[in-house]
Image (cartoon, coloured by chain):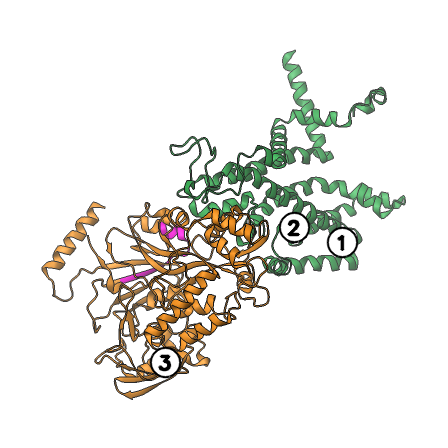
């Protein structure tokens, strides 16, 4: 260890001495462990965390997010403006080049949009862009994006769409030899072993501090942990809260995921609002977050909307833990000893099984008979989306990638959509109205109304806002992002 | 043998198990195995009375308490608590119910079905054999997990379903083994003689063929029992088997896996329970195998006699 430390100190000193000189023998290299090898590096095709970890550094998007989650222009020169309710105009940054020397301009944006929304391309990300009809070039650095109806979410959507070169992206070689405008470019892809990215010397933005990144594919969480402890990698994701003391360093950040139990508002027992309220009051969320999750989760604020997301209702607070009132409500509703089926799955999300079992025990304690049913993931999904037979209660973990209330609303609140379990037509109409409202204030007001109403009716049992926990090596310096992106340009190494 | 030697045997009429028990007493390892099995069965039957806590009673604030003899441990939870603060000792006691029940039922069900089909195939030959053995081939080639998923999605998960489904996917090995042995035995002179003097097929099968199968079947059953226990754990973990608040050893091992670096007691105690069960059954089965096999038994008898003679010679 000491010799390594001496080496790094020497390296830092020598780097400082010849700051600015090109082609030093020293390079700062970082290794990141990811769970799975990407099947392609064509960033528009798959919906895959391993692939995203790599291509977030190769490609860029029109809109970006700051480390706090605020939406800012990325490859766009300024925030987009609305020409008409269904037309958003983006001014582009000039002088940006793709890594294969193609220019970034209106043609590349049009090509990127048309490519990803083309049904024949079969992009797994297409659902993010379902409202986009087409993109039109206005001049070399101006593009109009046309949506099917008014879409207040379009700027957020453009934060998810990676820009690809107009010509080269149709080349079959593109998937294995990608080219983006980002701060890093592909150096080598050793199949089954690792992917190596090198700094892009022509990057338009601030020069990143790290010269080279290696992504190692380590499927087993235990192996990832021991690689980090052994010093083979500098960064691992999804660290179990129990292990934060075992790793050299760690960092946690409020993440995108919220765990929730959707109650069947039309079912026999859970159809009674008093029962639903009781099921909410029965759970000690504080104990769950502080003990089960070791403090790396916060009680959800009485809603499924992420606290960082647009539409979050800050007037709501978590349902209190009040088992006595819960018991009284159950008695009042005459639901003592009645059975509620709680459907869940195990192994997909962090501590899902433990959370579900804990909730079942809390409910049992207030006099409800809980029939917990764990299903294999495929069967679980069938149950989750079964419109005919809604389970009394079903556990879901919602991830809010676009950081906007629309997605959780559509999933869990809007009657008849996705896995929502109520028949509240009035609320559904409001969700639909909010989706079409482009006035920011008005839209926020509608969401506040919906979340308050759903809170009072207790349609959902929001459990916890989960934090992402990362394991660091001693030398890595980085502030994890709320959107869970691993942007190497924000990282640096110290010694 | 003694009864043959002494005509007085008819008068004394010893308890039929007495000789067996005396024989068992000579094999101390088998005695140990049998006692552990009896203890386990008692634990499973009496779990509600001897378990200190309800196995599903959680206390999140006192989760992952180590066993009593470790620094942070306390006497309230002898074997510590699990990831939700449930008592590990109580869970191990209750877990024995599901584990033993599933293991024994599946081995019995799958074994009986497989043995019957194997006997039919091996004894009858011809078209019956071809059909049964192709059925075995098809089922072996068919992915077991897919079948399980199909059944579970129709019937819903639960212990009964799990037992039936595991039996349905594990009977083939018995059929194959039984058929192979029957094919060999069928050619032996004593079976031919029995048929020649007009024994019915049933008598030939049950009186002359089946006894040859006893010891290999016991060995296979034991091996399968361990497999089934692990399969049950895997299924339950995926949500296809035992559903909470019930638990099983395998399920607790699977659940504690993530915590093994911070809380070894979650996997160790149910794991030890599985290991002890398998070892005990093995020790006892080893004795049973020898006892049920006439040739092996003769050898054991000869060894015992030789040892006796050596001892006598030395003492002389």
User: Mark 3 packing: few (<14 Cα in 10 Å), some, or many (20+)?
Assistant: many
- Where is residue A42? Give x, y as percent: 37, 73
Disc 3 element = helix
Q: Chain of mark 2?
A: B
Residue at mark 2 = B160
Q: Is residue A132 visible?
A: yes
Chain assigned green: B
Who is closer to the viewer here, A451 or A249?
Answer: A451
Q: CA distance from mark 3 to mark 1?
A: 65 Å
Left or right: B167, with B249 as reference point: right
Q: CA distance from mark 2 to mark 1?
A: 29 Å
Residue at mark 1 = B121
Disc 1 element = helix
Q: Chain of mark 1?
A: B
Who is closer to the viewer here, A236 or A326?
Answer: A326
- What mark, if any, has residue A113 been given in the picture? 3
Q: Are marks 3 and 1 in contact (CB under 8 Å)?
A: no
Verify whether residue B262 appears in magenta: no
Disc 2 element = helix
- Where is residue A361? Give x, y as percent: 51, 47
Left or right: A55, with B241 as reference point: left
């Amino acid at each position: 260890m000491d010799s390594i430390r001496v080496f790094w100190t020497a390296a830092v000193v020598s780097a400082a001495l010849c700051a600015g000189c090109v082609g030093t023998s020293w390079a700062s290299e970082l290794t990141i462990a990811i769970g799975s090898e990407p099947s392609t590096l064509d960033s528009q095709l798959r919906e895959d965390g391993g692939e995203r970890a790599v291509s977030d550094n190769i490609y860029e998007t029109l809109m970006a997010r700051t480390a706090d989650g605020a939406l800012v222009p990325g490859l766009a020169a300024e925030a987009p403006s609305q020409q008409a309710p269904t037309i958003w105009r983006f001014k582009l940054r000039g002088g940006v080049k793709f890594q294969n020397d193609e220019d970034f301009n209106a043609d590349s944006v049009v090509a990127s949009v048309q490519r990803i929304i083309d049904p024949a391309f079969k992009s797994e990300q297409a659902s993010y862009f379902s409202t986009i009809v087409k993109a039109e070039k206005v001049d070399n650095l101006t593009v109009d994006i046309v949506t099917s109806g008014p879409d207040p979410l379009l700027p957020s959507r453009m934060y998810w769409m990676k820009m690809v070169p107009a010509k080269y992206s149709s080349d079959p070689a593109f998937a294995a030899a990608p080219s983006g405008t980002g701060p890093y470019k592909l150096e080598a892809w050793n199949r089954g072993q690792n992917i190596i990215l090198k700094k892009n010397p022509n990057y338009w933005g601030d020069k990143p501090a790290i010269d080279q990144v290696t992504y190692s594919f380590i499927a087993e969480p235990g192996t990832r942990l021991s690689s980090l402890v052994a010093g083979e990698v500098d960064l691992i994701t999804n660290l179990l809260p129990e292990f934060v003391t075992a790793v050299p360093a760690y960092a946690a950040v409020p993440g995108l995921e919220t765990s929730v139990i959707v109650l069947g508002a039309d079912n026999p027992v859970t159809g009674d609002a008093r029962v639903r309220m009781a099921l909410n009051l029965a759970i000690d969320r504080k104990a769950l977050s502080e003990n089960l999750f070791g403090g790396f989760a916060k009680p959800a604020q009485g809603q499924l909307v992420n606290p960082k997301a647009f539409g979050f209702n800050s007037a709501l607070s978590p349902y209190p833990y009040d088992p006595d009132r819960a018991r009284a409500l159950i008695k009042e509703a005459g639901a003592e000893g009645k059975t509620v089926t709680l459907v869940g799955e195990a192994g997909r999300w962090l501590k899902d099984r433990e959370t579900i079992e804990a909730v079942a025990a809390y409910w049992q304690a207030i006099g409800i008979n809980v029939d917990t049913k764990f299903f294999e993931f495929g069967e679980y999904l069938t149950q989750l989306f079964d419109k005919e037979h809604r389970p009394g209660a079903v556990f879901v973990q919602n991830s809010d990638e676009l950081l906007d209330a629309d997605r959780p609303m559509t999933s869990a609140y809007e009657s008849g959509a996705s896995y929502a379990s109520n028949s509240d037509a009035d609320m559904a109409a409001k969700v639909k109205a909010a989706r079409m409202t482009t006035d920011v204030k008005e839209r926020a007001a509608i969401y506040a109304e919906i979340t308050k109403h759903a809170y009072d009716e207790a349609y959902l049992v929001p459990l916890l806002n989960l934090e992402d926990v990362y394991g660091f090596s001693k030398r890595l310096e980085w502030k994890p992002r709320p959107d869970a992106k691993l942007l190497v340009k924000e990282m640096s190494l110290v010694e | 043998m003694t009864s043959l030697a002494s005509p007085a045997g008819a008068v004394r009429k010893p308890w039929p198990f007495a000789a067996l028990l005396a024989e068992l007493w000579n094999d101390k390892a088998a005695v140990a195995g049998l006692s552990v099995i009896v203890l386990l069965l008692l634990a499973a039957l009496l779990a509600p009375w001897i378990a200190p806590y309800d196995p599903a009673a959680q206390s999140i604030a006192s989760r992952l308490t180590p066993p009593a003899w470790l620094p942070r441990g306390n006497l309230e939870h002898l074997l510590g608590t699990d990831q939700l603060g449930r008592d590990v000792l109580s869970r191990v006691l209750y877990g024995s119910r599901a584990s033993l029940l599933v293991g024994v039922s599946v081995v019995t069900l799958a074994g009986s079905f497989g043995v019957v089909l194997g006997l039919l195939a091996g004894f009858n030959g011809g078209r019956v054999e071809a059909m049964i053995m192709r059925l075995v081939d098809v089922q072996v080639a068919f992915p077991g997990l897919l079948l399980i998923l199909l059944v579970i999605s129709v019937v819903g998960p639960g212990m009964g379903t799990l037992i039936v489904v595991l039996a349905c996917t594990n009977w083939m090995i018995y059929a194959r083994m039984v058929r192979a042995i029957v094919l060999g035995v069928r050619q032996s002179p004593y079976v031919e003689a029995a048929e020649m003097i007009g024994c019915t097929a049933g008598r030939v099968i049950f009186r002359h063929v089946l006894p040859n199968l006893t010891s290999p079947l016991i060995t296979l059953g034991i091996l399968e029992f361990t497999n089934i226990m692990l399969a049950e754990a895997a299924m339950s973990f995926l949500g296809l088997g035992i559903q909470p608040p019930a638990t099983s050893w395998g399920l607790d091992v699977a659940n504690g896996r993530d915590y093994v670096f911070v809380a070894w007691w979650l996997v160790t105690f149910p794991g030890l329970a599985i290991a002890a069960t398998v070892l005990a059954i093995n020790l006892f089965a080893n004795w049973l195998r020898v006892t049920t096999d006439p040739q092996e038994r003769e050898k054991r008898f000869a060894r015992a006699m030789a040892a006796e003679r050596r001892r006598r010679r030395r003492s002389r």
